[in-house]
Amino acid sequence: METTSQDIIESIRHPSDQEVANVDAWWRANNYLTVGQIYLTSNPLLRRPLEPGDIKPRLLGHWGTSPGLSFIYAHASRLVQKTGQEMIYITGPGHGGPAIVAATYLEGTYTECFPDITRDEEGLRKLFRQFSTPGGIPSHASVTTPGSINEGGELGYALVHGFGAVFDNPDLIALTVVGDGEAETAPLEGSWKSISFLNPARDGAVLPVLHLNGAKIASPTVQGRKDPDEVRRIYEGHGYEVIEVSGHDLPGMHIRFADALGKAYAKIRAIQHAARSVGVVQGQRPHWPMIILRSPKGWTGPETVDGVQVEGTWRSHQVPLSGVKDNPDHLRQLEAWMRSYRPEELFNESGTPTEAVRAINPSGQLRMSAHPAGNGGGGYSPLTLPDWRGLAIDFDPADRGTFKDESTTYLGQLLEQIYRLNPTTFRLFCPDETNSNRLGAVFNASDRTFMEATTNEDIKLSAEGRVMEVLSEHLTHGWLGGYTLTGRHGMFASYEAFGMVSVSQTVQHTKWLEEAISLDWRESVPSFNILLSSTAWRNDHNGFSHQGPGVLSTIVNMRGTIVRTYLPPDANCLLDVSDHIFRTTDRVNVIVQDKQPQFQWLTPDEAHAHCRKGFGIWDWAGNEDLDSGEDPDIVIACAGDIVTMEAVAAAQIIRQRLPHMRVRVVNVVRLQTLSRPKDHPTGMSDQDFAEAFTTTKDVVFCFHGYAGVIHQLVHGRPDVDRFHVRGFREEGTTTTPFDMVVRNKIDRYNLVIDAINNTQRTIRGGADLTRWCTQQLERHERYKVEHLEDMPEVTDWVFEPNPEFS
């Protein structure tokens, strides 16, 4: 990439009087449209004096941040028009939605996406009427806003999404506005370090604009009140070259901001030119530019209302004039405010934006609201995937359950091949846990990304690396969010308990997809794939803080068109499930699989059939009489790797010690198959459910997570009271692996007792087996304290097949 010519840079930095006038006209038009969206249902061009009937019955929206957002947008559009630079605009202050909707309307993109919102007076009326009203659009820069990839409803993710968008996207700049309220959030505070992972030779650039207007909803912001020198040093300490612009005078602010933006753009192009022509030197991270813009909150709005200062204070945050419908003075002040933008200069007789307004708009896909990166990259491109069977564990079915292996190691090998086959469209994002989660095979294909200095002791760490590791769930999750929403693929891998750190981000991404699929102009995007490993049941060494399966409880509540959860019991099932999710679009896929050595149950062919169905009866683990046509005495069901071992072991105890008690084992891989079809698109049919779980027999269901998840999923099935779910009960500590399951009463001995207690007939010998199981549990309590490990009959246990199925 060549540097932009000095003449163009100079013209950006020093706009002519006419260019300043055009930028100002666009900005005034945007401010006018923003105010109109907040207040009006009719009379959009003020053809007559405002009346109470023109005002919405409920006034919702956020004015305070909006003029600053549109000010930045206007200047960025001018830069794009003059340079042809590919750029997207990410809005951190999400409540400034009306300003961004107005920008897309002025660019024409909004009408292209929503043809009913025409660029005339009637279209303006509909644009105003729909904002933040029933049947309309949200108040945020949300999914319905063309070009947006960041929902502002939950602050904190703008900057991390910006960086995710430009990884492996060398021609793109993500201009990211960070509000000073948003700047106080933990995820945003952590996002500034992302430049330590940005390689200018192969990645695009993020241009942060920290917009300090001084106030949140009802109080000052921290950085808005800090000494400017302190604020500047904060960001210089992160490694940024800080460019500052302050004031409210016009046209002075236009001239100063144009100069700042031109300087920042020249710096970005110089950094990229050097990296792409000379190369990147390890440890010589560039000092990327950022802009700190200080302008009044509610700039150009009412200065005072009812004798109280509004402009420049927190009172301008939402609706500065709240009594417009009933207060004639407020109504007159609103009309004067809107007329101050001189709408007769901005919209022609038909209501179309005038040439003076349209003059700074880029054309076609260079419009920031129309750039393909803001809409799935412009079209879904699938991954090239290897045949997972070439990595699978091939074994004789007679050996099932007799040997252990680390299942996630095989996923690591699959990811390694995906890296090799997709060198610019796939990344793994992991909070410093890639090796810990046994995914280290990826380092055969790529180092970790790092732009800071390295030493001889560092391993697989370089500027050329593409494995994303930083000790932050917020960053790795957010990077992947920006990466997938702009059309690329990846996986976020975390310890299960710490998936809860970023679960709110997971929810927000899910909500984004839930809305996006209903918009025919939104392109499909690669799915957001999550691996939760180092799970609750095998964090016995780390202790209670690392033992928490709460992500599953949260994610199953999300809309079924989007969410899928998978609990593969072994490596081959994990490979099959992973191959599947990497082929999907518009989904949030969650896999829960532990990293420790675990029994391997299914051959590759069996695993494929099992995972495609999502559940299955493991006849080889039970002992029911298939020829009799009678239901078993009890069904032991399981979902999750560790609990599957306990379920199979419990069934084996019953087969061997109480052989005339008939037990069936059902394993569930895709959790939502338990739902009714009307509750989830993958829910099993009534017939499938009856064939698996019968319609009358009791089911002891051992589940990886909290028991309530299963009760929720089987709601509405026949006689759900017969489901006795055992799961994580918030009993944990630093202890042995088997003691973890005992503490939560999901171990094989408690499962056997549960099975006996819940059969519908009295089985001779059941009382003796119950006593034996109780004695085993008492022995376990003594043994673990004395020997600091589990009993040999647990540690040395292997599966012994039912002779009828061997």
Image (cartoon, grey):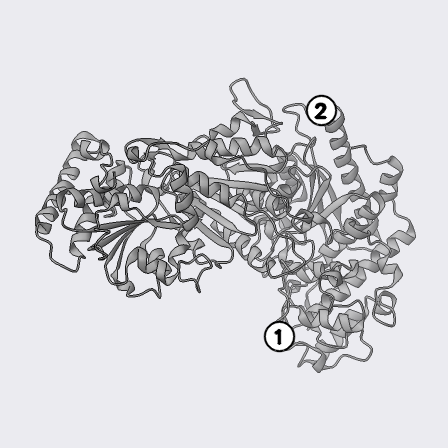
Residue 740 x/y as whole percent: 27, 41
Q: Quadrant of the N terminus?
A: top right
Residue nearest the viewer, comparing 698 with 249: 698
Residue 279's label in the rendered image is: 2
Residue nearest the viewer, comparing 387 with 190: 387
**What residue appears at the point 14 percent right and 46 percent down from the top-left corner?**
659
Residue 270 drawn above or below residue 36: above
Residue nearest the viewer, comparing 171 with 702: 702
Residue 715 drawn above or below residue 239: below
Disc 1: which residue: 58
Residue 294 x/y as whole percent: 71, 50
Residue 486 drawn above or below residue 469: below
**What residue appears at the point 62 percent right and 27 percent down from the top-left corner?**
464
Give the distance between the C-alpha atoms of the residues marked 1 and 2, in whole angstroms.
Answer: 57 Å
**Mark 2 is on which residue type?**
Gly
**What residue appears at the point 8 percent right and 52 percent down from the top-left corner?**
764
Where on the picture, by quarter, is residue 334? bottom right
**Mark 1 is on which residue type?**
Arg
Residue 81 x/y as whole percent: 83, 48
Residue 468 in the figure: left or right of residue 331: left
Where on the picture, by quarter, is residue 456? top right
**What residue appears at the point 60 percent right and 53 percent down from the top-left corner?**
181
Tell which circle, 1 or 2, labels the residue nearer the N-terminal end: 1
Q: Is residue 503 visible?
A: yes
Residue 162 drawn above or below residue 629: above
Tell me if mark 1 has few (under 14), some (14-19) or many (20+) residues whose alpha carbon lies within 10 angstroms of its own. Answer: few
Residue 199 x/y as whole percent: 66, 32
Circle 1: element type: loop
Residue 384 in the figure: left or right of residue 796: right
Number of numbered discs visible in the structure rendering: 2
Q: Quadrant of the C terminus?
A: top left
Circle 2: element type: loop
